[in-house]
Structures are given as C-alpha cells and as structure tokens.
C-alpha cells in the first residue's frame, strides 16, 4: 500500500514535467551527446579522447605560456589526481612532457611535444567537423548567434556567482 497521499504524486509529476526541468535536461542531453560524438570521432580518427584534446587546446593556445598541472586541473574541472593520471597517459603517448618550473622546482609545468602539436592539429580538424555538423549547421545563423550569446551570459553569471 502506498502511504504517499495522491496529491503528492500529482505535485511530483508536475515538478518532473516542468518546463525548467525539461529545458535544462535538453541542454544537458544535447551537450552530452555532442561531447560523445566528438569523443568517438577523435578516438576513431586520432587515437585520443576529447579530454586529451582539451588539454592540448589549453597547452597550444598561447605558445610559450607556462601551464602547471594545477592550472590544467582547474581549467578542465578535474581533480588533481585525475589530472595527474591524464597527464601520465599523455606523457606515455608522447603528446606532452612535464618540466620543472624555473621559479619553483616543486611545480610541474606541462608542455606539448612536437608529436602533441601534430596530434592536436589533426584532432582540431576532426573536432571542428563534428561541431560544425551537429552544433552549427542545424541552426539558422541568427539562432546560432543568439544561442552562443545566451551561453556566454549563462557562463558569465555562473562565474560571477562562484567568484
């Protein structure tokens, strides 16, 4: 026998079917599916996953910039141990190397290798193709501009709240 009063079931159903729940779920599902498409294409065509590409994007963005493992963890919202394991795998694959920081030998800096830069360029092309096909092309140009503007506003609000 269900001890929950029937009106609670109705309230729960209304909450579960609310436009806010539906719309946010659509955002999360779409982002997750797009990330999975990117990851699958990268693994198949380049032998690296999406998270490794994110590391290479960060490392190649400003040549010569010193990037620590801690910065990578923060930028990628990974744990310190998760970042260490990821960089270990990337180092074993010859994509990156760790070097001691000239200012503090306890700090490990991470830099791309020549192989890493080559892998990044190949993966960036695959990434761009998938993003174009599933994120850009399905929308009219004005809708795409509004979407990216709205996402930037959401990101700004979340950063201000966290800061």
Image: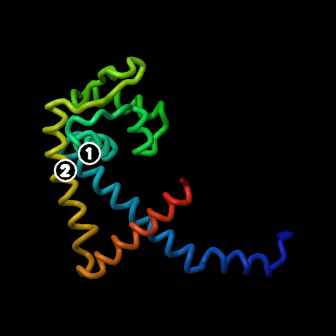
Q: Residues within 10 Å of mark 1 (few under 14, many from 20)?
A: some
- Judged from this view, the residue extending furthest toward the front is 103
Please tell me whether mark 2 sits on a helix, a strand or a loop: helix
Q: Is residue 4 left or right of residue 106?
A: right
Residue at 28%, 26% in the rendered image: 91
Q: Is residue 50 above or below residue 20?
A: above
Quarter of the rendering occupied by the N terminus? bottom right
Question: Residue 10 appears at what percent x and percent y?
Answer: 73, 81
Judged by depth in the image, the label closer to the viewer, 1 or 2, is 1
Q: Is residue 60 above or below residue 149?
A: above
**Which residue occupies the foreground of this view, 86 or 39?**
86
Q: Nearer the viewer, residue 125 or 159?
A: 159
Residue displayed at 33% across by 61% down: 34
- Residue 54 picture quarter: top left
Label 1 vs 2, first from the N-terminus: 1
Residues under numbered marks 1 and 2 in contact, where contact means CB atoms less than 8 Å apart:
yes
Q: Residue at x 83, y 71 (%)?
A: 4
Q: Give the residue at the far top of this rendering.
A: 105
- Whole-percent x and y of residue 109? 33, 27
Label 1: state its secondary structure. Answer: helix
Indicate left or right for 6 with 53 as reference: right
Neighbour tally class for label 2: few under 14, some 14-19, many 20 plus, Cα within 10 Å: some
Between marks 1 and 2, how big is the CA–CA gap? 8 Å
User: In terms of depth relative to the viewer, which is nearer, 21 or 149?
Assistant: 149
Location of mark 2 (residue) = 124
Query: Where residue 76 sits in the image (x, y, percent)?
Result: 40, 45
Q: Please report the residue visible at 44 percent of the width from the left and 42 percent of the height from the top.
A: 74
Q: Residue under label 1, please give it.
A: 57
Which of the 4 quarters of the picture holds residue 105? top left
- Relative to 9, 31 lies left or right: left
Vertical placement of 68 versus 101: above or below?
below
Total of numbered circles in the picture?
A: 2
């Amino acid at each position: 026998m269900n001890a929950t009063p029937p009106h609670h079931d109705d309230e729960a159903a209304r909450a579960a079917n609310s436009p806010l729940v539906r719309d946010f779920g659509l955002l999360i599902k779409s982002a997750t599916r797009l990330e999975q498409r990117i990851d699958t294409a990268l693994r198949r065509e380049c032998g690296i996953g999406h998270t490794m590409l994110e590391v290479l994007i960060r490392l190649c963005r400003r040549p010569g910039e010193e990037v620590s493992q801690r910065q990578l963890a923060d930028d990628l919202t990974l744990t310190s141990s998760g970042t260490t394991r990821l960089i270990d795998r990337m180092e074993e694959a010859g994509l990156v190397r760790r070097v001691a920081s000239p200012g503090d030998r306890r700090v490990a800096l991470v830099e791309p290798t020549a192989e890493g830069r080559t892998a990044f360029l190949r993966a960036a092309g695959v990434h761009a193709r998938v993003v174009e096909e599933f994120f850009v092309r399905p929308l009219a140009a004005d809708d795409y501009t509004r979407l990216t503007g709205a996402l930037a506003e959401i990101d700004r609000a979340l950063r201000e709240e966290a800061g």
